[in-house]
Amino acid sequence: MGEQADYPKVFAAQSDEPMQFVADLRDVATPDPGARRQTDPVRLAPLIIEETRDRLRAVFEAMPGDPLLMLSGGVDSIFVAAVAVEMGYRPCAITVVTADGTDRVNAAAAATALGLTHEIIELDGPAVVELAEESVRRLEVAELWEVSYAIPMLAMLPLLERLGTMDPILTGRGADALFAGGKTLASPIDSPAAAVELDYAVRKESALELTRTRLVPDFYPRILGDHADRIIHVFQTVRFWELSETFAPPALFGTHDGHPVDKLCLRIACEQLLPAPARSLAWAKKSAIQHSAGIMGALSAAARRTAASLPGAQTYTDPLTEPFEAVATRLFLARLADTTKAHTH
């Protein structure tokens, strides 16, 4: 690990697996805030770069070929792209968006800056609804977050078939769980209480996200079929998990240009690898892909249209403009009415 710091343990061997279910392989539940002793995000950035190189090197040796990359426009996927390019690879970037999605601009800027071929798949409202129906059919559940994540995956299938390769498809998925992406701390970041808070948040999300025993354990085979084994969660390894256990709050939370940021050391690492004109992309804020790709917005619009089509729906207020609390209540009442009719007959 060079001059980075004194580490409390020897990390697991590097993995060439598409993803490791860390919560099934390690005890991620037992608190250990005392292990979070690495505080300097600038010193940790080169370590993250080297670890990601090593991970990609292992993957590419196990799955030789021209990689693809799910490029969402957030720092995680942009960083993976930048590391791959620095290693001499030029993955074909794929971005799935709706017209209202916010991912397009940053994803396109990153692809251009890194010299990547960029395939943008744009979905309109009817296409999102159609893919939602297909997702529910394949997953056999109608859970919002599962279905809305399945939609962009299904949207990629025609492109994967057209490209006709079985090369790895890289994603930055898993980084948020390990590096507390999207989280905030109530305690001052230098305090022992912040270390406890961070440790709890990371362990809780990792236990939910990094396990095979999810709501749909075979999610990828159901959605992607023969392509499922190509999906590479770059950060979802035991080794990355063990590394992340050593990161203290100041390594992950700080400010940039006067604004609070998360995943600080990862953002610094990304900035170091990007060409100068594109370095601001390392600091862009982004919500979950379901929101940033516009999938959730398209499904919400479809829910409003469904509510507006109910008998008498526009007698008092308009479901197309009323608060979503009213829309959700309308849809619940419609379901209640259907259940009552079924019991009556």
Image (tube, helix red, strand yellow):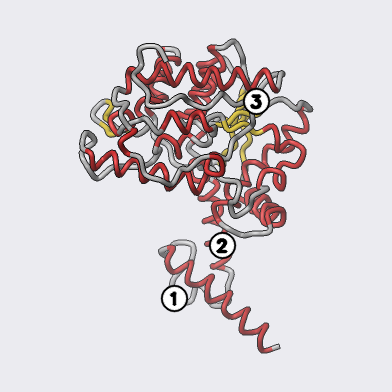
Q: Reading the chain from its start, which is encountered first: label 3 or label 2?
A: 3
Q: Is residue 256 above or below residue 173?
A: above
The residue positioned 48% from the left and 43% from the top of the image is 27
Q: Distance between the residues labelled 1 and 3?
A: 51 Å
Callout 2 amino acid: Arg
The residue positioned 72% from the left and 33% from the top of the image is 159
Secondary structure category for the residue under label 2 = helix
Task: Tell me the mark number nearer the camera, choosing from 1 and 3.
Answer: 3
* Residue under pointer 2: 305
Q: Distance between the residues labelled 3 and 2?
A: 36 Å
Dots 3 and 2: beta carbons under 8 Å?
A: no
Callout 1 amino acid: Tyr
* Residue under pointer 1: 316
Whole-percent x and y of residue 85? Answer: 56, 14
* Residue under pointer 3: 68
The numbered dot on residue 340 is none
The residue positioned 48% from the left and 26% from the top of the image is 11
Whole-percent x and y of residue 212? Answer: 60, 46
Secondary structure category for the residue under label 3 = strand
Query: Is 81 in front, or is 48?
Result: 48
Task: Tell me the mark number nearer the camera, choosing from 3 and 2.
Answer: 3
The residue positioned 68% from the left and 37% from the top of the image is 156
